[in-house]
Amino acid sequence: MKYRIRPFVLMVAIASLALAGCWNPARSDLDPPLDEAPGDIGNGTIPPYTAPDDLLVIPYREFVAVDGEVFLQEGGLEWNLRGHFDAERKKFEHDVSGFQIGAFNVTYELWWAVRGWAHANGYIFANAGREGSHGQIGLPPTESGKHQPVTTVSWFNVAVWANAYSEMLGRTPVYYMDEEHENVLRDASIGQDLKTAYTDWSADGYRLPTEGEWEYAARWRGNDNSVTGVVEYPDGSGRFWTPSEWASGAGDSYLNEAATNAVAWYAANAGGSTHAVGGRTANQLGIYDMGGNVWEWMWDWLAAYPDTPQNDYRGPDSGTYRAGRGGSWNRAAEDMRTGVRSGARPSEWLIFTGFRLVTRV
């Protein structure tokens, strides 16, 4: 059986007061063959049990502490029904609380190790994960690919894996099957029926970032105004932000090839595949690959932004597509912009998509 792998490039159009979304039907010449994925994308090889202490030797697990404050969240640049980027951006003032965010995308090596512990402790996965964009699915990490981001994992798989990682390290899981937070989400295979996951935002476990947290971390520059064009917000505050037309950490617009090449793996420089995490220049917070390499799953359902100021905005309570940010190895420079929003169904598994984690301060 052949599985069609669709690009993670759903862009949304806002017409009148309604949000319309559809998959972009265009395919890039760099997209892999439609039948690249094997028929069995389930659990693959069951990893051996991994003890929590064994994680200490796995690199690229660091987190960056981010102080919360007010910024101007600047969505828009969505893909409209005519297949063009809308020029008008939608903005709202967003007061974000402090958090910690992964300095790197989760690597296949880390994914594999945690999955070994998870299987031994009653966790069930719907997809075993792929080593980078073109590695094998559900097999032991290789020396050449183990530090590439894990891909081909659905939103539900990621939520279940994050809970396993939390419990493995003695933290309280974040995602549950019920509003009372009594039944921990441990089975990704029921995702289609569950439709959503209930979140304990007070838990100290690992979770996906909200769009607001991701964009805050992607655009923060602190007091660095050494580059022409950065945005000061609030006015007179001495706090500066990367414009939404730039890739995270870049020194100029996405139209400046050298500026984008320095911080992102994308169609112009990736050579048709993912790369090991941390291979480009970090942004001003010391976070790598927030543009390119892989799209990143977000917590939020993809929807129009609010019209009023918000505190710790987490999107609507329901929807069809979970948001994704950051662009990927096979997309053009314009998708590296910090203002570009995309999304996919939470059950989708995509070779362009990985994730990074956040946790509370």
Image (cartoon, helix red, strand yellow):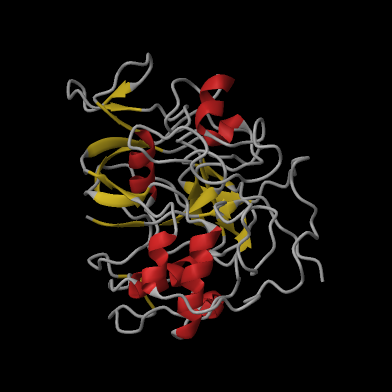
How many marks can you see?
Answer: 0
Specify the farthest residue to the top.
228
Residue 125 vs 212, above or below: the answer is below
Q: Is residue 95 left or right of residue 147?
A: left
In terms of image quadrants, where is residue 175? bottom left
* Residue at image point 63% right, 33% down: 332
Q: Nearer the viewer, residue 204 or 342?
A: 204
Point out the image quarter for the N terminus: bottom right
* Residue at image point 59% right, 39% down: 80
Residue 224 vs 19, above or below: the answer is above
Residue 170 vs 310, above or below: the answer is below
Point out the image quarter for the C terminus: bottom left
- Where residue 202 sits: x, y (%)? 22, 66
* Residue at image point 29% right, 18% down: 225
- Where residue 265 sits: x, y (%)? 58, 37
- Where residue 264 sits: x, y (%)? 54, 34
Q: Is residue 345 left or right of residue 221?
A: right
Q: Is residue 156 visible?
A: no
Q: Nearer the viewer, residue 18 or 319?
A: 319
Specify the farthest residue to the left.
237
- Where residue 194 sits: x, y (%)? 48, 77
Q: Is residue 308 left or right of residue 257?
A: left
Q: Nearer the viewer, residue 272 or 60?
A: 60
In terms of image quadrants, where is residue 251? top left
* Residue at image point 48% right, 56% down: 106
Residue 236 vs 355, above or below: the answer is above
